[in-house]
Amino acid sequence: MRICNGSWLSSRACVLLAGVVLAVQSPATLRAETAKGDIKIGNIAPYSGPASAYSAFAKTEAAYMKMLNDKGGINGRKIQFISYDDAYSPPKAVEQARKLVEQDEVLAIFQAVGTPSNAAMMKYMNAKKVPQLFSATGATKFGDPKNFPWTMGFSTSVYRIESAIYAKYILAIYPEGKVAVLFPNDDYGRDIYGGFKDALGAKARTTIVAEASYDSAEPTIDSQIGKLKASGADIFVNFSTPRFGALAIRRVAELGWKPVQFINTTAAAISNFKTAGLENAIGLITATSMKEANDPRYADDPGIKEYLDFMKRYNPEGDIANGQNAYGFLAAQVLQKVLEQCGDDLSRDNIMKQAANLKELKLGLLFDGITVNTSPTNYFPITQMQMLRFNGTSYDKVGSIMSETVMQPETRD
């Protein structure tokens, strides 16, 4: 069994991850820069700790690499997918990044999970000139090719793009609306809310009539919702993480408050609405770029069928209703495209060159009309989103696909 976090792990997930490595390990260690044999891809995910649910990304990606290897690999080369646990601890993430780069000699670290871990390792990865590729976060700071050319994020929602789309929609459809905002008191909350205020521009001062934040350790957000309702707002923008998003939806209904509600895509899974009561979520507006596998309207969709067939064969214990699995599948498809474009030049330089050269890439889980695009000056692979309204069972499209100019990343320390 492979050691994923410094201790022997018994979960099937890490056995699966180890299986990808052990099944294809070549007898000789080859330097990542020249990569004449297997392709070593590193990964860091929280298999333990407070964010362990996000390990679903890596489990699905490991299963995808197994599928690719079963089909002969990439350009005839098998993939070694080496994943380590950081318990969602930034110092541990840096330790694991060093191990992957200096001991395992990976070609790239792909889909490291979370803003804190990626931020902690970003300077190290750029100093070493090792791709920090398609990091699993929508934070704006991971799309800054001028200052961090070896780091590229990947999200179906870049936080400031998503919130800017809500702001532009509100200005167009509800120009006299009074907005109340709920957001987590962390980097994610400040990033997504900052994009919203920036997009409102000068109207932010008159449009936003109340705001409330919460800490992740709080048991409820009843007081915050009470404060927002008392403001007289007729629009509620809910920038919460899944658990608090559901708590907010339920509390709004309990108080008899009936604003137009927007909820960020992070908390907008239909399965999450069930915990709040589906009837309480009717009319909620969100935006995303990816179809939901659990939505009955996509039962016959070819892209959804491809994903479900993959899950049944290669990740049968994964929950198809969990959007994290679909996201992992999507990210792995993009990595596959980059590696294929590299051809026989599997150098780290060429990895980043090809990652920044994705043109109109269509993938089955994305809404029709939404494509993956990058360039040397655009490190945000997805900048388009579809507005949706929940009808109690599934989502109805609202208008056409919207896109937004990427906000400039915030100042670094």
Image (cartoon, rainbow, N blue to C red):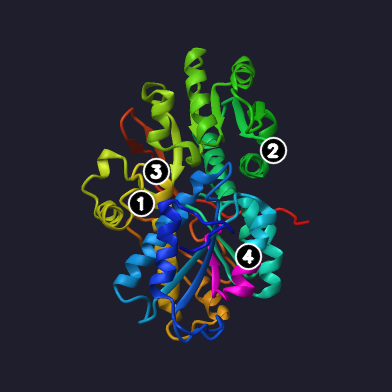
Magenta region includes residue 91: no
Q: Please tell me whether mark 3 sits on a helix, a strand or a loop.
A: loop
> What residue is pinned by disc 4?
97
Q: Report how far apart the C-alphas of labels 1 and 2 lie in the structure.
A: 33 Å
Residue 107 at x, y percent in the picture: 54, 75
Decide if residue 176 is in sight here: yes
> What residue is pinned by disc 3?
322
> What residue is pinned by disc 2?
202
Task: Say few, some or many: other residues with alpha carbon within 10 Å of mark 4 (under 14 / 14 to 19 / 20 or more).
Answer: many
> What residue is pinned by disc 1?
367
Callout in the foreground (3, 1): 3
Q: Magenta residues?
A: 97-112
Q: Residue at 54% of width from left, 77% of height from top?
A: 353
Decide if residue 361 is in sight here: no
Residue 62 at x, y percent in the picture: 42, 61
Q: Residue at 46% of width from left, 77% of height from top?
A: 39
Three-letter code, disc 2: Ala
Task: Say few, some or many: other residues with alpha carbon within 10 Å of mark 3 (under 14 / 14 to 19 / 20 or more).
Answer: some
